[in-house]
Image (tube, helix red, strand yellow):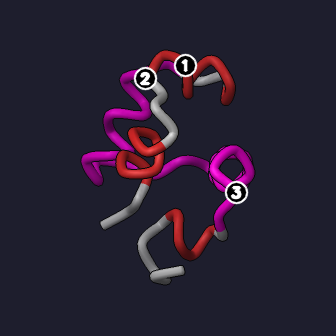
Amino acid sequence: MNNIEYLRKAHKMTRQELGDRLGVKPPAIYKWERGLGSPQMETAIRLADVFGVSLDYLMGRDSA
């Protein structure tokens, strides 16, 4: 399980707002949050940067 939805909500962002920052459409973010797909590495790095977390934490591999 990943932490994308948790982080997005903690930062009070909609899927549209996050998508605008990343250059992706909201349905892609929905799929990532539900575990139906994963962002490409470049996008995952940008996601981690947006939220100020490690890739491991973003993808649910680390608790800090």
Q: Secondary structure at mark 2?
A: loop
As measured in the structure, the alpha-carbon distance from the residue carrying label 1 to the one carrying label 2 is: 5 Å
Viewer-proximal residue, 63 or 41?
A: 63
N-terminal-most mark, 3 or 2: 2
Q: Quadrant of the C terminus?
A: bottom right
- Three-letter amino acid code at disc 1? Glu
Viewer-proximal residue, 40 or 4?
A: 4
Q: Is residue 57 left or right of residue 49?
A: left
Q: Which mark is residue 14?
A: 2
| Coordinates of residue 53 in the picture (x, y in percent) | 65, 64
Q: Which residue is mark 1?
A: 17
As measured in the structure, the alpha-carbon distance from the residue carrying label 3 to the one carrying label 2 is: 17 Å
Q: Is residue 8 left or right of residue 36?
A: right
As measured in the structure, the alpha-carbon distance from the residue carrying label 1 to the one carrying label 3 is: 17 Å
Q: Main secondary structure of the magenta part?
A: helix
Q: Are marks 1 and 2 in contact (CB under 8 Å)?
A: yes
- Three-letter amino acid code at disc 2? Thr
| Coordinates of residue 37 in the picture (x, y in percent) | 37, 48
User: Would you place residue 24 above or below residue 38 in this image?
Assistant: above
Q: Are marks 3 and 2 in contact (CB under 8 Å)?
A: no
Q: Secondary structure at mark 3?
A: loop
Residue 24 occupies quadrant: top right
User: Would you place residue 61 above or below residue 30 in this image?
Assistant: below
Q: Quadrant of the N terminus?
A: bottom left
Q: Which mark is residue 52?
A: 3
Residue at 54% x, 47% y is 39
**What is the magenta range?**
25-53
| Coordinates of residue 40 in the picture (x, y in percent) | 61, 49
Q: Is residue 44 magenta?
A: yes
Residue at 67% x, 29% y is 22
Residue at 43% x, 23% y is 14
